Image (spheres, rainbow, N blue to C red):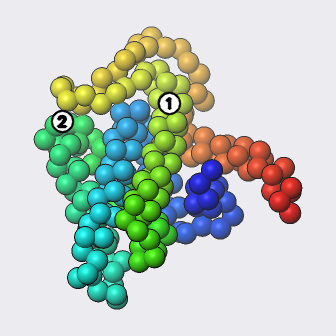
Amino acid sequence: MNKRFQTYILGNSCAPLSTLAGGGLLIIASSRVAFALVACAALLWVYGFTVLSAFVAKPILPKRGIRVILLFLSSLIGSLFLLVLWLMSPLLALGSAFIILLCPVYCMGSELFTHLDSQTLEEALLKTLLDAALLGLLIIAFALIREPLGFMSLSVPVREGPGMLELFKEKDSTSLFPIRLLSSAGGGLLLLGYGVALFRQLRKPSIQKEL
């Protein structure tokens, strides 16, 4: 498993900016599968094009303040993704705008962008896309749990109408309130907490062997 995934999300030490942005993005985007798919695409877009732009502009980038420049650059790239999504499906873009705007913040919290000088373009691109894909897949996995149990539906993004299509919808559902709570932000935090606790419990034997 990716070392950054274990350290930032499930480990003992973390980078505060990355954990805060990644945790918020995870909870917000995993409320619906359609939003989770948009978040995954936005992460790959922002990570990939930020790395490409940084390598192209490397000769003219100053040594001091490069993190600020990359933050503005990633924000611009995220805005371009939002513009493309708006042209394809305005209502879906409106509903997922905040999710997309969080992606550059999480991108800049990545340690991968502090070592661009010591990497080739292929290495940096592969590592950053893997980093984005890990969070994107985690968001989709949470959405596949939260939406069917919380909303009794499963949505996918589409261009027509409201921007998402519900593949099935239980209108007269009598599910228990604790299950429906998963659709809220509090339910997402509870699910994240149980998931992290379970992962750490499963990791204990491997950690003891390493020691």
Report whether residue 146 is seen. no
Which residue is situated farthest in the top direction here?
172
Location of residue 9 in the rendering, given as x and y in whole percent from the top left corner: 59, 56
Q: Amino acid at mark 1?
A: Leu
The residues tagged by marks 2 and 1 sit, at their Cα atoms, a distance apart of: 22 Å
Pick whichever, 178 or 5, lies toward us: 5
The disc at residue 144 is 1
21 vs 66: above or below? above
Say which element carries label 2: loop
Which residue is situated farthest in the bottom direction here?
64
- Please report the residue visible at 47 percent of the width from the left and 67 percent of the height from the top: 112
- Please report the residue visible at 31 percent of the width from the left and 52 percent of the height from the top: 45
123 vs 116: above or below? above
Residue that carries the numbered disc 2 in the rendered image: 89
Q: Quadrant of residue 162?
A: top left
Going from N to C along the chain, the mark reached first, 2 or 1, is 2
Q: Quadrant of residue 165?
A: top left
Pick whichever, 172 or 124, lies toward us: 124
Location of residue 21 in the rendering, given as x and y in whole percent from the top left corner: 45, 60
- Please report the residue visible at 84 percent of the width from the left and 49 percent of the height from the top: 205
Location of residue 194 in the rendering, given as x and y in whole percent from the top left corner: 67, 43
Report whether residue 176 is seen. yes
64 vs 196: above or below? below
- Please report the residue visible at 13 percent of the width from the left and 41 percent of the height from the top: 87
Pick whichever, 26 or 1, lies toward us: 1
Q: Amino acid at mark 2?
A: Ser
